[in-house]
């Protein structure tokens, strides 16, 4: 290269004012501008950055001497670089002093121009534009973390919400509410449309015996001129489950393209009398012809709310309440290494139940007869839970929790939910005095359990009682005892009984009548001890041990002991 024509000149100043007041714009180097700002903000690094800028700007403008006249010695090159660095330092110092002087001259008291006042207030940094040419009117809106459902509206949403999940493979098991099906070969499942208002549960897995993942959603009640919402999820090919869609761009694309796939979506099926809609448990297969009641799902979810779902699942976003087969409650004791060996995909979810897990129903402050009464009647314990754990002392949250545990436990095969369901039932049906103190709550609780037993028998393959071999017998004894105490309390009220308390008796009577399908006799007036005859005519002595605590027999029989002066039993060994 022998002439300046082969070089591009990059001056320090990107805008120069001409004599006539016009501005000649020169394409600025963004890297250069960034380095300029960095130099202003970090004086300690000025020398190093100025050297770097000198190397980038070592080519002079056209008014400099010919490059070919430069000596080729290293010392001369270093000398020229040092000169450029000195010139850069002097230029920056002059620029800083001129800017400082210009800023001082722009005093608000000396300016009669409102435009000038605003421009001075808006200057926060020195860039390539003169003072007063830029003005900040308002900050730019921050993009939302996730697009809202109202961002895209389509007329097809007038029939209800839409749940989109694309690329579900054949043979995958998909379920929603009381319906479950296997995607057939050569079929495509892209989602569900026409979802009505209410609480819904949509889940999926690779097959009937695999781990499953699901989402609870709440479809809001809409006016006649309002449209439904769009819920976008994705099929995780690696874990073969339905997962959150983490890409906002993909969510926007799926929402905008809804009209193109709307006809391919499966319509939401509402069970009707005589129709069959059966959900499969992880241990069962889909094969049943039992009819379901048309309102069975609303009965199963009557007390589930979005706030309760957020509290249990820990989900912070509305309609993003995710649960899986391996979700667990937080254990008090440290688990063994084998118990902690779960897949990375499922190990991060902890369920925070409202009802405490401990078995003790008496308070630490109670003593003597009061402690004994609280141990045998859990009314005080449940009242304390309602007061301390339920939001605004709303007892319906306890009902909502057993509904959540029953459906999540059975549809996903979640053992922690099944255990919590059994624990709450055993505790509540031992709260005898609660029938008189909270009759509305108890009626709703009985009706919720009744609906669950119906769905367990008619809508599921398998039973929630199967996860614990002793659970069926335990519940039978608890319900028998509860019926006996319920009848005693209601009869004792006589003419003072109110309508709510009467409704509790009727609700349990209907529940008891249905339990005859399982051969559960809750009357409790059959022989508990005595002699009975075998088929061969032999008479034997027998005694039922299940009701020893209720009848104060056996190890529960009262014993008279002699106490010392300190109130302790005599004959005990003291250490």
Image (cartoon, grey):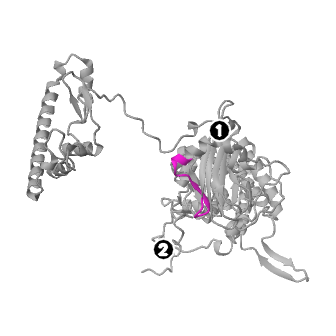
Helix, strand or loop under label 2: loop
Q: Is residue 347 left or right of residue 405?
A: left
Residue for point 83% across, 51% down: 275
Disc marking residue 228: 1
* Segment tinted magenta in the rendering: 236-250
Query: Label 1 crowding class (10 Å Cα cut-off): few <14, some 14-19, many 20+?
Result: many
Label 2 CA crowd tier, 10 Å (few <14, some 14–19, many 20+): few
- Looking at the image, which residue sits at the far front? 2
On screen, residue 481 versus residue 331, left or right, reads right
The answer to whether residue 214 is above or below residue 4 is below
Q: Position of residue 299 (x, y in %)?
A: 72, 48
Q: Which mark is residue 262?
A: none
Is any atom of residue 116 visible in this view?
Answer: yes
- Image coordinates of residue 526 in percent, x first then y, are 81, 67
Can see residue 399?
Answer: no
Q: Quadrant of the C terminus?
A: bottom left
- Identity of the residue drawn at 25% across and 43% down: 8
Residue 40's spot in the image, x, y percent? 19, 42
User: Could you tell me which residue is drawn at 15 percent across and 45 percent down?
Assistant: 66
The residue carrying mark 2 is 564
């Amino acid at each position: 290269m022998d002439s300046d024509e082969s070089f591009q000149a990059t001056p320090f100043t990107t805008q120069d004012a001409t004599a006539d007041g016009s501005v000649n714009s020169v394409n600025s180097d963004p890297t250069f501008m960034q380095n300029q700002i960095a130099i202003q903000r970090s004086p300690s690094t000025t020398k190093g950055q100025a050297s770097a800028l000198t190397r980038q700007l070592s080519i002079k403008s056209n008014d400099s001497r010919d490059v070919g006249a430069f000596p080729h010695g290293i010392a001369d090159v270093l000398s020229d670089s040092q000169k450029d660095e000195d010139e850069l330092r002097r230029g920056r110092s002059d620029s800083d002093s001129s800017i400082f002087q210009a800023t001082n001259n722009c005093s608000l008291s000396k300016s009669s121009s409102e435009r000038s006042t605003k421009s001075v207030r808006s200057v926060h940094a020195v860039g390539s534009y003169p003072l007063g040419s830029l003005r900040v009117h308002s900050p730019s809106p921050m993009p939302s973390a996730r697009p809202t459902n109202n961002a895209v509206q389509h007329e097809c949403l007038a029939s209800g919400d839409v749940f989109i999940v694309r690329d579900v493979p054949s043979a995958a098991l998909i379920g929603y509410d009381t319906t479950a099906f296997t995607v057939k070969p050569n079929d495509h499942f892209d989602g569900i449309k026409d979802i009505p208002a209410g609480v819904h549960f949509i889940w999926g897995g690779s097959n009937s015996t695999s781990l499953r993942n699901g989402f609870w959603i709440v479809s809001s009640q809409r006016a006649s001129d309002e449209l439904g919402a769009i819920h976008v999820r994705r099929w995780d090919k690696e874990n073969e489950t339905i997962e959150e869609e983490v890409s906002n761009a993909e969510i926007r694309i799926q929402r905008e393209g809804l009209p193109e796939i709307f006809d391919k979506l499966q319509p939401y099926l509402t069970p009707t009398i005589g129709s069959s809609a059966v959900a499969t448990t992880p241990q069962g297969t889909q094969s049943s012809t039992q009819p379901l009641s048309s309102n069975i799902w609303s009965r199963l979810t009557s007390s589930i709310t979005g706030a309760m779902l957020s509290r249990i699942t820990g989900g912070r976003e509305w309609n993003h309440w995710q649960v899986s087969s391996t979700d667990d409650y937080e254990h008090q004791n440290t688990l063994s290494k084998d118990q902690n060996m779960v897949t990375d995909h499922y190990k991060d979810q902890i369920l925070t139940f409202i009802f405490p897990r401990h078995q003790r129903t008496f308070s630490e402050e109670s003593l003597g007869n009061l402690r004994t009464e609280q141990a045998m009647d859990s009314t005080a314990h449940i009242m304390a839970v309602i007061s301390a754990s339920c939001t605004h002392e709303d007892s319906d949250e306890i009902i909502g929790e057993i509904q959540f545990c029953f459906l999540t436990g059975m549809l996903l095969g979640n053992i922690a939910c099944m255990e919590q369901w059994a624990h709450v039932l055993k505790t509540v049906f031992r709260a005898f005095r609660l029938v008189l103190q909270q009759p509305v709550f108890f009626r709703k609780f009985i009706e919720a359990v009744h609906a669950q037993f119906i769905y367990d028998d008619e809508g599921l393959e398998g039973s929630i009682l199967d996860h614990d071999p002793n659970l069926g017998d335990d519940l039978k004894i608890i319900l028998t005892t509860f019926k006996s105490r319920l009848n005693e309390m209601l009869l004792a009220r006589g003419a003072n009984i109110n309508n709510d308390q009467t409704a509790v008796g009727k609700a349990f009577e209907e529940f008891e009548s249905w339990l005859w399908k399982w051969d559960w006799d809750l009357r409790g007036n059959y022989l508990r001890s005595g002699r009975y005859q075998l088929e061969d005519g032999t008479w034997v002595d027998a005694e039922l041990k299940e009701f020893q605590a209720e009848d104060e027999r056996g190890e529960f029989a009262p014993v008279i002991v002699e106490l010392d002066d300190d109130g302790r039993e005599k004959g005990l060994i003291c250490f």
